[in-house]
């Protein structure tokens, strides 16, 4: 702490005051109050990020990662807030207010209403403020407004906090991964976490996901330190701190989005099972898991039923009914919103509708569509970056099973195979839940982004070590998809070449994939002879 005060406050204090002055001038209300509020948030954010980066021990590399992660998210959030009312679709209520996401806009409006009402902050958990299903993020946002911006509505305060929380997860991710699997995996995972476009966009918005990533990183660090030491002295020393970080991570997720907490608990339970063996799982661990998981189910069902749509039934029944109704609604919306999809549904049996929606959701946001579908410049840039990021991540996730199976260390292999199943199970569920929606589907998928980054980092490390040819073959399959689908979109919007019927186009793509796969199998067998 002494070194921190001497070396870092020299630049943290003036930078916080300067940025606070700039941000206050961009928002309505009393300039002095805004300056003090923004400066305080900057001071806390810079101090904690600096402390966390030094504590994680990643040196200058990690420091640059954390700085870049914060700058990209905060600058992107401010830029979209200022640009959307001018260069976006100004007739759209959300964009005219400077918001990228409808959820962020509505939650922000309710947070300001609650903060300025004089009612207790805990009213965020009442049905009156049911737009935020679970109430945790709404309560926190209202608290910030009430005590740091009491005179005027300043949405950029919440953008600043989202960028801070998103960047704060990075040092914990780095330290946990480096301790568990080594520095190379921490380096790769850290850069993926810092630069992935979807995380940059969400991290610059007042959304749940940045908080979930930070809480996931806390839980990961707590779990790794709890399970990573064998000597009794070290275990006694670290056990209390580990439980605090693990509890803080799971507890934070339960308040913000219980589904993320439940998924994380399942991942960690599988981690224990596949690396420790059944004999080493103590009864109190099983009991703790059951208690927290059951509490999460009750919180989730309560949040889903805050609007009163499901008056009766057990928590599991409410969740099941919500999922069934949500999937039906998403399929209906996709069919109604696209004449092309409607015609395709008419040509295929009913049982193929859900598989089609799921596959369509996996490929969202569609990269060729991002380049050619008509839109304004700011949305074209956002769409291309989001799609390019997902299409760069997708081959690594596809190869995650191969890379995991090729790991020589037994415990590591068991965990990464389990993590591959969990990540892909989540991708399939969110694709089904979000359907072909360009925004909800990728956002739901990004809830487990921290684990996706770890999985992709492991694949990249595996390929750099093994130079396995299947990496390039999967990239070739993706290139075929993007090229043929891109021509289909170009012929649709710009009349470049003839447009094949959709089913014929997909048949060509799938046939090309089969040929690449068979050629790869033949090459591998020829080399092994």
Image (cartoon, rainbow, N blue to C red):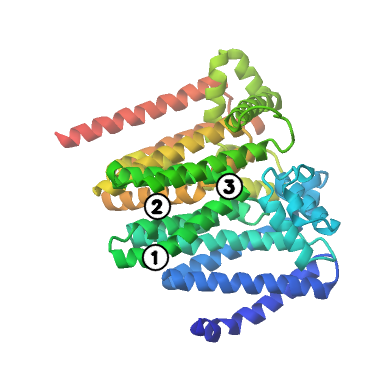
Question: Horizontally, is 76 left or right of 26 in the view?
Answer: left
Residue depth check, mark 3 versus mark 1: number of the one nearer the observer: 1
Give the Cα distance between marks 1 and 2: 27 Å
Please tell me which residue is depicted at 40% across the width and 52% down the height of the picture: 457
Name the residue rendered at 60%, 37% in the picture.
369
Q: Residue furthest bottom?
A: 6
Element type at mark 3: helix
Q: Where residue 247 sits: x, y (%)?
A: 50, 55
For the residues carrying marks 1 and 2, which lies nearer the camera in this image?
A: 1
Position of 26 relative to 207 (above/below): below
- Quadrant in which the C terminus is drawn: top left
Q: Secondary structure at mark 2?
A: helix
Distance from Cα at disc 3 to Cα at disc 1: 40 Å
> Left or right of 183: which side holds 43?
right
Q: Which residue is mark 1?
A: 238
At label 2, counting other C-alpha atoms closer than 10 Å, the crowd grade (few under 14, some 14-19, many 20 or more) is many
Res 386 label: 3
Query: Which of pointers 1 and 2 lies earlier in the amino acid sequence?
Result: 1
Could you say where residue 132 lies in the image, as x and y percent from the top left? 71, 45
Count of number-bearing discs? 3
- Whole-Å distance between the Cαs marked 3 and 2? 19 Å
Residue 477 lies in quadrant = top left
Q: Earlier in the sequence, mark 3 or mark 2?
A: 3
Give the residue number, with chain letter if any, for mark 2. 457
Of helix, strand and loop, which one carries label 1? Answer: helix
Q: Residue at the location (69% across, 73% down)?
A: 40
Q: Locate residue 45, reporting x and y percent.
A: 61, 69
Say which of 179 and 498 sits in front: 179
Q: Earlier in the sequence, mark 3 or mark 1?
A: 1
């Amino acid at each position: 702490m002494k070194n921190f005060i001497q070396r870092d406050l020299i630049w943290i204090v003036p930078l916080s005051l300067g940025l606070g002055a700039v941000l206050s001038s961009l928002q309505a209300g009393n300039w002095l109050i805004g300056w003090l509020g923004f400066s305080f948030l900057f001071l806390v954010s810079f101090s904690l990020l600096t402390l966390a980066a030094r504590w994680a021990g990643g040196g200058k590399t990690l420091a640059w990662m954390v700085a870049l992660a914060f700058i990209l998210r905060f600058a992107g959030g401010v830029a979209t807030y200022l640009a959307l009312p001018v260069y976006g679709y100004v007739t759209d209520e959300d964009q005219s207010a400077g918001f990228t996401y409808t959820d962020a806009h509505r939650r922000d409006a309710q947070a300001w209403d609650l903060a300025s009402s004089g009612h207790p902050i805990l009213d965020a958990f009442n049905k009156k403020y049911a737009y935020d299903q679970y109430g945790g993020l709404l309560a926190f946002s209202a608290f910030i407004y009430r005590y740091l911006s009491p005179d005027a509505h300043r949405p950029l305060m919440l953008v600043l906090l989202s960028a801070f929380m998103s960047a704060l997860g990075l040092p914990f991710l780095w330290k946990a991964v480096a301790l568990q699997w080594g520095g190379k995996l921490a380096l790769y995972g850290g850069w993926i976490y810092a630069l992935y476009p979807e995380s940059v966009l969400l991290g610059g918005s007042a959304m749940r996901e940045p908080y979930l990533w930070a809480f996931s990183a806390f839980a990961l660090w707590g779990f790794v330190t709890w399970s990573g030491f064998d000597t009794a002295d070290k275990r006694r020393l670290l056990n209390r701190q580990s439980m605090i970080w693990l509890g803080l991570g799971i507890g934070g997720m339960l308040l913000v989005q219980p589904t993320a907490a439940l998924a994380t608990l399942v991942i960690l339970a599988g981690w224990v099972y596949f690396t420790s063996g059944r004999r080493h799982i103590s009864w109190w661990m099983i009991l703790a898991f059951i208690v927290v998981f059951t509490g999460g189910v009750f919180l989730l069902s309560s949040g889903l039923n805050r609007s009163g749509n499901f008056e009766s039934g057990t928590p599991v029944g409410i969740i099941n009914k919500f999922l069934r109704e949500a999937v039906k609604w998403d399929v209906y919306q996709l069919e109604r919103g696209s004449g092309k999809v409607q015609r395709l549904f008419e040509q295929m049996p009913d049982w193929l509708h859900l598989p089609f929606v799921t596959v369509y959701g996996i490929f969202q946001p569609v990269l060729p569509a991002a380049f050619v579908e008509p839109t304004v410049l700011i949305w074209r840039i956002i769409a291309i970056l989001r799609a390019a990021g997902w299409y760069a991540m997708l081959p690594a996730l596809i190869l995650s099973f191969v890379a995991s199976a090729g790991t020589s260390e037994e415990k590591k292999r068991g965990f990464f195979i389990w993590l591959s199943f969990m990540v892909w199970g989540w991708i399939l569920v969110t694709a089904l839940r979000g359907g072909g929606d360009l925004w909800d589907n990728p956002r739901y998928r990004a809830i487990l982004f921290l684990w996706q980054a770890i999985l992709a980092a492991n694949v990249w490390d595996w390929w750099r070590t093994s130079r396995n040819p299947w990496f390039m073959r999967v990239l070739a399959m993706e290139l075929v998809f993007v090229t043929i689908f891109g021509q289909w979109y170009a012929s649709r919007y710009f009349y470049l070449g003839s447009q094949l019927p959709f089913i014929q186009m997909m048949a060509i793509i799938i046939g090309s994939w089969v040929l690449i796969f068979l050629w790869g199998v033949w090459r591998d067998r020829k080399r092994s002879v």
